[in-house]
Amino acid sequence: MGMIQINMYSKNLSCFTDITLITPIENSLFNSQEIYKSDHKYKILWLLHGGNFDKNVWVNYTNLSRYIKDRDVIVVCPNGLNSDFANQPYFADGYNFADFYFDELMPYIYYFFPISRDPKNNFLAGYSMGAAACWMYGLQHPELFGGIAPLGSLPKNYSYLRPYSNLTNYEFQKTVSQNPSKFPSGYGKKDSGIHIKEINMISKYNSVTDFLNSPEHTYDRLDEALKKGNIPPVYLASDIGESNYKDIVEFKEYVEKADRKINIKFDFSNKNKNGYDFCDYVLPRMLNFFEV
């Protein structure tokens, strides 16, 4: 197993950022010109971490390096902080992670490493916050990926905001502040009230309508993609607790009743693990699904 640490400047993030590459081959081989002279191109797994963690969590808390040892794949783990891997134009000088991912990170990795650009050899996975980004990226640019694996997250559904769609971002913030418990949370227990991170996510758009029409409202984006039949294969594993099991069942029924079918593997085989223990359990199953 090899590990390569990259520190690069991003104009979209307005700062330097760190990326980790995990490879099935030793680092010394990357110092040899032979690997670049070869016509062989590795498959790639873009792997996104969960909230309150960073890129190192996959090495520190799972056996990922062992799982890819004999596989023809290189794993790229970007550091997304707590950005939801979304554009955050009002953070500091601007921290537009989605723009960074598509406009800077992907071209950078393809240029400097022997990795296939073919969409059928590109796979996207993530846990929790990273899983939400999988839905967002995979539905926004299905042409770039041969499969996505949102681990531990269904598409974000804020359809309950439709009655407030005429509100500007300022009006929404004012309305929420008066009675936050009136707005169910998409994080953890719904009746805990809307989370500050969700308020920031919604109010960075000019209006509630703009948010509902954005890539971050992935439930509607999935509905649109299902109608078009334009979705890469999906491996959906979940450690969602019993309190949210109804949501899982309803989502499964919703997808199965869609007019156009998609290749989706529901994996709810283990309910005794959560967090990155759950990720460690599903990683090899996910890799097998992607056939890497």
Image (tube, rainbow, N blue to C red):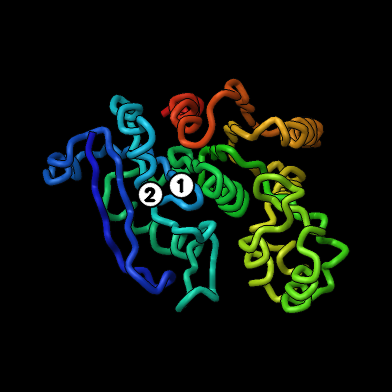
Q: Position of residue 97 (x, y in %)?
A: 48, 63
Seen in the image, is 270 located left or right of residue 160?
Answer: left
Q: Position of residue 230 (x, y in %)?
A: 66, 44
Q: Position of residue 233 (x, y in %)?
A: 59, 35
Residue at figure coordinates x 51%, y 57% from the top left: 85
Task: Mark yes or no: residue 84 visible.
Answer: yes
Q: Which residue is mark 1?
A: 49
Disc 1 + disc 2, Cβ < 8 Å? yes
**Rendering quarter of residue 200:** bottom right
> Which quadrant would the N terminus be assigned to in this image?
top left
Tag 1: amino acid: His
Tell me the CA gap for discs 1 and 2.
6 Å
Residue at figure coordinates x 73%, y 69% from the top left: 210
227 versus 199 height, above or below: above
Tag 2: amino acid: Lys
- Between disc 1 and disc 2, whose residue precedes? 1
278 versus 111 height, above or below: above
Numbered circle sitting on residue 55: 2
Instruction: Report helix, strand or loop for mark 1.
Output: loop
